[in-house]
Image (spheres, grey):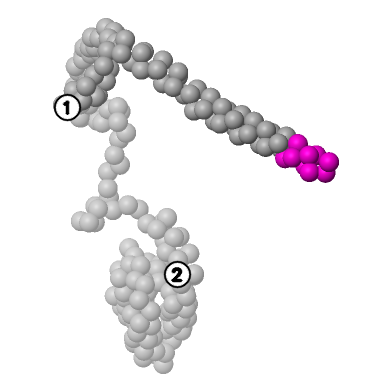
């Protein structure tokens, strides 16, 4: 019995452990390639190569792979469908290290890993609480009354009378203030008297002339 023909491996170089291939493997480009030019050129190259086997004994395989390449091209050239396909592919792809080995899950803090003793946390160093330093209270200052001197007391050439002389001058000024009014009243009274006497004389002379 002849071995079954593997078109993916023979025509596209995809090993059995990577079958069925995803869109990126089918086009022969890097995983999660997003450049439209790279995707389109890779699809055209793969389709041109697979078409050479349409007239042979594996024409059915050739047509099937051509349809898969066309679907991969249309899916990856459309941003929305490519994003959905990449999300699905990431969920199915196991987490691997750069060397191709499967990554070891990291144990959460506090859980014991087989063969490795958990690291003990360093002891806490007690810190003495600091007490706020009391600030000294200053006593209230007592206001001392200050006697304000007369600024003219220190001017040179100015006589500074005592209290008695100031009082005498004030009294004399009040007494002298009434003298002008007395003189004015006396003058007015004298003028009025003269006018009255003149009028009496004129009347008397007028009576004598008529008689």
| Quadrant in the rendering for residue 62 | bottom left
Identity of the residue drawn at 32% across and 63% down: 17
Label 2 or label 1, whichever comes before in sequence order = 2
Circle 1 is placed at which residue position?
A: 157
Report x, y in % for residue 22.
40, 68
Is any atom of residue 9 visible in this view?
no
The magenta span reads 202-211
Vertical comparison of 142 with 74: above or below: above
Q: Nearer the viewer, residue 136 or 162?
A: 162
Residue closest to the eye, 163 or 174: 174
Residue drawn at x 33%, y 80% is 38
- Picture quarter with the N terminus: bottom left
Residue 206 covered by magenta stretch:
yes
Left or right: residue 191 compared with residue 157 = right
Q: Secondary structure at mark 2?
A: helix
| Residue at position x 22%, y 56% in the image | 98
Crowd class of label 2 (few under 14; some 14 to 19; many from 20; radius 10 Å): many
């Amino acid at each position: 019995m002849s071995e079954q023909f593997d078109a993916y491996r023979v025509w596209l170089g995809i090993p059995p452990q990577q079958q069925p291939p995803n869109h990126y493997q089918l086009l022969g480009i890097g995983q999660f390639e997003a450049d439209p030019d790279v995707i389109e050129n890779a699809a055209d190259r793969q389709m041109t190569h697979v078409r050479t086997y349409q007239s042979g004994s594996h024409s059915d395989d050739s047509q099937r792979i051509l349809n898969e390449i066309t679907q991969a091209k249309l899916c990856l050239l459309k941003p929305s469908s490519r994003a959905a396909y990449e999300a699905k592919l990431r969920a199915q792809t196991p987490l691997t290290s750069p060397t191709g080995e499967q990554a070891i899950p990291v144990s959460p803090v506090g859980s014991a890993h087989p063969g490795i003793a958990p690291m003990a946390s360093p002891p806490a160093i007690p810190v003495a609480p600091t007490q706020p330093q009391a600030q000294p209270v200053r006593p209230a200052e007592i206001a001392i009354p200050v006697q304000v001197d007369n600024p003219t007391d220190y001017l040179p050439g100015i006589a500074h009378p005592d209290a008695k002389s100031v009082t005498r001058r004030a009294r004399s000024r009040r007494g002298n203030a009434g003298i002008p009014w007395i003189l004015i009243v006396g003058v007015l009274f004298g003028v009025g008297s003269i006018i009255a006497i003149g009028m009496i004389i004129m009347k008397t002379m007028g009576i004598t002339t008529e008689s």
